[in-house]
Amino acid sequence: MKDITKAANLLSRLDRIPVTRTMISIMILLLLAWVFESFDVGMMGTIIISAKHAWNLTEDQVGFLGIATTLGVVIGLIPGGRLTDKFGRRTVLLWGTAIYGLLTFFSAFSPNLETLIVLRVLAGLGEGAIFPIPYLMLSEFVQSNKRGISMGWVNGALTGAYAFPLMIGAWATNAFPLEKAWEVMSLFGGIPLLFVIPLLIWLPESPRFLVKKGRYEELEKIVEKLEKQANLSQDTSLVNPSILNGLQTTEMSRGKMGDIFKPPYMIRSVVAYLVFGYSIYVWYVLNVYGPTMFSNQGLGVNNALTFTAIMMAIAALGTVVHGYLSDKYGRKVTLVVFGAAATICFLLFAYTQSYNGLIILGILSAFFGLSIVSFGKLYTSEQYPTDIRGLGTATGEMTGRFFSGVAGLYFIPQLLAWGGNQVVFISMAVFIVLGTIPLIILGRDTHNISVEEAGSSVLSKGKSKLVK
């Protein structure tokens, strides 16, 4: 790093800036990047139901199709994280979006299951490269005491957006023969190609990445523009001591893979990855196999898709509430409370027999259980310095999605065939408990402090203050 004092000044000035119209536009672009990606992932519930009918798939074939995209994501995450730290968040986001959009569109013309699976895996590679980037950039743009609620609003809107592929899936299965619905959904999945243009025009690079590369002039233009919108002076003597300390204690980092498994980051990684792991398992089960499970309980295909869509909308509200509480009371306590509530809901879900009980528990499970995943992501991104933040979050995504979204998800059809919905709901409750215990014992809190201090090897007590 060429000039730590200059970097500390620019980042300190950035950290005091409230949410301006430019910041809102950045949040909207990152949200849309997630929304388009969410459609690609969320449409798998419809594709599975449709392809199973079209090709008379066995449980093993359904399992392979269900994990195809996630397998590609897992393979693409680590290389994507390295590319993100080396070439920038914006560059990787642009290329990843173009790649998965193009491959998803071509998957509509798959002549057989094998071709569809291969194209889904390849599309997942592009998604894997960009999965962590929106919340990574949010944590690096937004001021320290607003990271949680900003993530809550953006991820709440994202979670609600998962209702779109389900609703379009319900429309596709009603408007077209069931065996053709997967083709219709894949064609819709090519729309992200058009989104590359606004990203190219309006999305700036992450300020923390600009500092890492010594591109201070670019960062200064961004900061001055935001200060002007917020009616703040351009104070070149302003320094946040926690930001300066964070930059100084992480200056020697070289972004090596092994760094995330060395003290003090090893324990942080294990705790954060377990939280993300159980949260993504819950999310994948309900999003990918929720329609199948609710259909098994007598709702029918269209009603099951609609009910799962409603759960996603409820989860959006839960995500916003979670964000507010995590900024006010801390990441750790909020994650523990929501995890405990979700565990109780899933255990009750496993044994409910009534239609009204199904509806009520579905709403509560969505509010508490599905909202955790976004803060598992945010919590992970706050554990590392800039040089390894992309790598650390990508490794967390890879680990969680492999064990939960690939290995775990592959066995869901077998679990459903063996023990029905009951066994699957119990498995979600057990995973939450196993992931929460290490958080309670070893987890640290990272709310209301700068992202530099949160990721540094030393975490000071109390709120950061600006000094001259």
Image: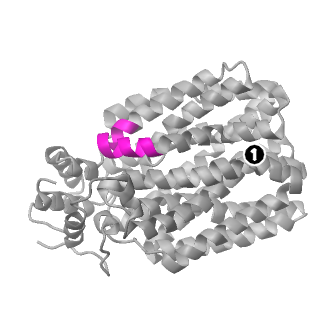
Q: Which residue is mark 1?
A: 306
Report the magenta residues as a range. 78-92
The three-letter code of the residue at mark 1 reads Thr
Residue 389 x %, y %: 36, 55
Q: 31 or 102: nearer the eye?
A: 102
Q: Is residue 170 magenta?
A: no
What residue appears at the point 54 percent right and 54 percent down from the top-left corner?
399
Give the left or right position of residue 352, taking residue 90 as reference: right
Q: Quadrant of residue 48?
A: top right
10 Å neighbourhood of mark 1: few (<14), some, or many (≥20)? many
- Helix, strand or loop for the magenta stretch, by majority: helix
What residue appears at the point 55 percent right and 60 percent down from the top-left corner?
276
Quadrant placement of the C terminus: bottom left
Residue 149 x %, y %: 45, 63
Quadrant placement of the N terminus: bottom left
What residue appears at the point 77 percent right and 36 percent down from the top-left corner?
61
329 shown above or below 128: below
Q: 310 or 103: nearer the eye?
A: 103
88 shown above or below 342: above
